[in-house]
Image (cartoon, rainbow, N blue to C red):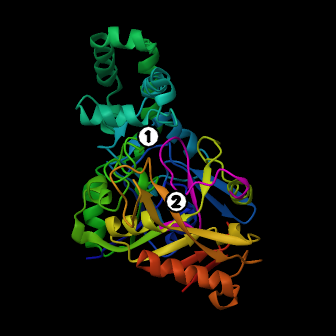
């Protein structure tokens, strides 16, 4: 029986997981998504073509790989169908869990209304409805994808739900769907998605028994995990490696090699603490060089230096076997490159992630910069100062940096 290799983000998301999933998918039979919604985004560049994936697993770009969307995902049928239109002949290559929860337009209305009501205390969500959809799931009032196969029954449930909560929704400015329009919408979803909906838990067990090579991918990053991230400025799902088990119906013994993805610097989207953020010229240069704008929202990302303290935390939480270090080339041309090696909190220096990072001040170690790593495919050819930086990071985070990306191109990847 095979074990499933796993890829997980180690920072605040946007680490470049898509390129590594695409790279590894070339040697795997199945790529399986276990958490998150269409607030996530993977950008993959192949030749002259750029693909932006939000819900469909990155294995879709390998004609030989099959793709599973697990029960831990919240799936917006409208957005999923739009994303499917980029590709031909998906039947037999794409499978959706009948237990994945459905995200409908009213979830986005609720999300945006809550953010407006919070004013300057808003979390900074994408407004896509992810939190309300997961909230309905936990409150046991959500709806699963299998229910789309009976649009009339699902329509009645949603209309009843709105009737019971009318005063609340009226106060929030959330519009009750018109029953006939809702039914037509759900029937449209069924017409497209029905061939793809199946029991993916049983499917996972079967393909593992058949000794297939399986790759698991999540969304966002460890520091956005609902339990282990910078709460409440987090996402609504379990983004760490353990989430793959509940999100796909497998057990911890089924997990094989864990590859953690991290940028050679650090970014964050939305509000919340970010100790190593650089608000000056160097942060702006990182944003410009790295084209740091959200795949899903287009929002400019907050940029800063590599945080080795948060990285050690993420490596341990996820049981990381190797790290893939992305976007090394973005640091080309800096005279000095910094790394956060500790935090100062209440006048004391600490080397772990505390309960609250809000008042943590970074303690930096500086490294000499380098001129050019872009496109390099051999570790030994890298500038000496770049190699020194990588080996220092490796020692700080306590695990091997086995993959290094030096451009968005698929082939510009160093394997150590």
Q: In the displayed structure, does residue 373 sit left or right of residue 211?
A: right
Q: Residue at x 68, y 88 (%)?
A: 384
Circle 2: is it few (<14), some (14-19), or many (20+) Cα within 10 Å? many
User: Mark 1, mark 2: which one is toward the viewer?
Assistant: 2
Q: Quadrant of the C terminus?
A: bottom right
User: Does the magenta-highlighted stretch encompass residue 263?
Assistant: yes
Query: Based on the displayed image, in which of its 4 quarters is residue 372 positioned?
Result: bottom right
- For label 2, the SS is helix
Q: Is residue 102 above or below residue 56?
A: above
Circle 1: is it few (<14), some (14-19), or many (20+) Cα within 10 Å? some
Q: In the displayed structure, does residue 43 sit left or right of residue 12?
A: right
Residue identified by numbered label 1: 193
Nearer to us in this view, 395 or 215: 395
Q: Residue at x 31, y 53 (%)?
A: 247
Q: Is residue 11 above or below residue 207?
A: above
Q: In the image, residue 404 lies at what x, y percent? A: 58, 76
Nearer to us in this view, 268 or 186: 268
Q: In the image, residue 197 lies at what x, y percent? A: 36, 45
* Mark pair 1, 2: CA separation: 19 Å
Residue numbers of the magenta segment: 261-282
- For label 1, the SS is helix
User: Does the magenta-highlighted stretch encompass residue 216?
Assistant: no
Nearer to us in this view, 406 or 82: 406
Residue identified by numbered label 2: 58
Query: Based on the displayed image, in which of its 4 quarters is residue 98 positioned?
Result: top left
Q: Is residue 129 above or below residue 204?
A: above
Identify the main secondary structure in magenta: loop
């Amino acid at each position: 029986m095979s074990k499933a290799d796993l890829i997980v983000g180690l920072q605040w998301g946007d680490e470049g997981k898509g390129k590594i999933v695409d790279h590894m998918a070339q040697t795997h039979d199945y790529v399986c998504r276990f958490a998150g919604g269409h607030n996530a985004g993977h950008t993959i560049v192949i030749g002259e073509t750029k693909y932006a994936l939000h819900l469909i697993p990155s294995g879709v770009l390998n004609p030989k790989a099959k793709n599973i969307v697990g029960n831990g995902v919240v799936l917006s049928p409208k957005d999923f169908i739009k994303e499917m239109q980029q590709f031909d002949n998906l039947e037999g290559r794409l499978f959706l869990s009948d237990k994945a929860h459905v995200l409908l337009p009213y979830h986005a209305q609720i999300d945006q209304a809550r953010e407006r009501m919070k004013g300057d205390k808003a979390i900074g969500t994408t407004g896509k409805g992810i939190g309300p959809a997961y909230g309905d799931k936990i409150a046991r009032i959500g709806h699963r994808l299998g229910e789309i196969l009976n649009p009339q029954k699902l329509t009645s449930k949603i209309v009843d739900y709105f009737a019971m909560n009318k005063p609340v929704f009226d106060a929030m400015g959330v519009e009750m769907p018109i029953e006939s329009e809702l039914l037509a919408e759900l029937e449209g979803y069924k017409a497209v998605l029905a061939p793809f909906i199946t029991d993916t838990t049983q499917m996972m067990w079967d393909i593992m028994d058949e000794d297939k090579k399986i790759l698991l991918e999540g969304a966002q990053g460890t520091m956005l995990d609902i339990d282990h991230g910078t709460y409440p400025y987090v996402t609504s799902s379990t983004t760490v490696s353990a989430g793959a088990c509940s999100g796909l119906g497998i057990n911890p013994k089924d997990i094989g090699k864990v590859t953690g993805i991290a940028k050679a610097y650090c970014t964050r989207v939305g509000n919340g603490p970010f100790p190593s953020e650089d608000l000056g010229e160097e942060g702006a240069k990182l944003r410009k060089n790295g084209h740091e704008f959200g795949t899903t929202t287009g929002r400019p990302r907050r940029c800063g230096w590599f945080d080795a303290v948060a990285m050690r935390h993420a490596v341990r939480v996820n049981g990381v076997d190797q790290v893939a270090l992305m976007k090394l080339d973005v640091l080309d041309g800096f005279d000095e490159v910094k790394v956060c090696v500790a935090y100062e909190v209440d006048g004391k220096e600490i080397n772990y992630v505390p309960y609250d990072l809000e008042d943590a001040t970074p303690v930096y170690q500086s490294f000499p910069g380098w001129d050019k790593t872009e496109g390099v495919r051999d570790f030994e050819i890298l500038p000496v100062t770049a190699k020194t930086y990588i080996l220092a990071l490796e020692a700080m985070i306590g695990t091997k940096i086995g993959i290094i990306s030096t451009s968005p191109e698929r082939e510009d990847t160093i394997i150590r």
